[in-house]
Amino acid sequence: GLHWGAWVAVALRASEALGDWLWTARDSCVWMLGAQTRSVLMKRGPTSTLLGFSSLLLVSCARPSDDERAANTSPTLVGFGTAMADVARRFVLLGRASQAGRFELAEYQLGEIEEQFTETLPHASPPKEGNPEVLPGMVSAFVSTSIADLRQAIATRDHAQITAAFERTASACNACHMASGHAFIEVPLAPGHDIPNTDPVAP
């Protein structure tokens, strides 16, 4: 085998190669760490700088770029149908709560529906079928008309006015579904029924 002196020589050459690599990497990575960090590292002696940098190299240089961080933190788009399924569930609850005299619950559900229309649906991925190009305008119109109509009706605590506003809103929903190519998703006009309507079709 190799004499122990030869082993020492091999180890020294490996150490020198590692040192050269670390100094080269230091020059690249320290520059990315910012002026303040560069100043601190440069003021230290070669040994402490090299040891300190070896630790920073594993942490700082492995950090993702701004583009990578943005890609990792970008919110996943909600599907339009997924958001509308939540709207349908809450609209059913709104109608049933109003019928039961639980007006605060009805108002809460209306607020959640409004959030979907103002915060989620404008950024949702549109459906691939039908006529999705009509949806942005209809979403905006629903907020200013139907939601406002329901809010005013619920505030009266009058069952007749709430039922009438519910029917108008359901009709607006069905008109939107028809225009967007989803007429098969039928919203019952009277409160208390599930959405969509799955009753047998009349012959």
Image (spheres, grey):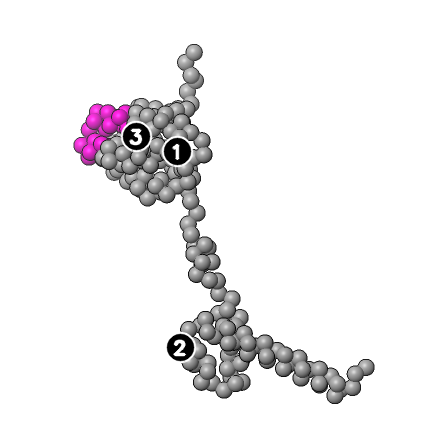
Q: Quadrant of residue 149?
A: top left
Q: Is residue 51 left or right of residue 189?
A: right
Instruction: Identify the element where label 3 is drawn.
Output: helix
Compared with residue 149, is residue 40 higher up or lower down, i.e. above or below? Answer: below
Say which residue label 2 marks: 36
Instruction: Identify the element where label 2 is drawn.
Output: helix
Looking at the image, tell me whether mark 3 or mark 2 is earlier in sequence order.
Answer: 2
Instruction: Identify the element where label 1 is drawn.
Output: helix
Residue span colored magenta: 149-170
Q: Is residue 158 left or right of residue 58?
A: left
Q: Which mark is residue 198?
A: none
Q: Does the magenta stretch mainly form a helix, a strand or a loop?
A: helix
Q: Which mark is residue 95?
A: 3
Say which residue label 1 marks: 132
Q: CA distance from mark 3 to mark 2?
A: 62 Å
The disc labelled 2 sits on which kind of residue? Gln
Quadrant housing the C terminus: top left
The disc labelled 3 sits on which kind of residue? Gly
Residue 113: give x, y in percent of width and height. 31, 38
> Residue 151 lies in magenta, yes or no?
yes
Residue 38: give x, y in percent of width and height. 44, 78
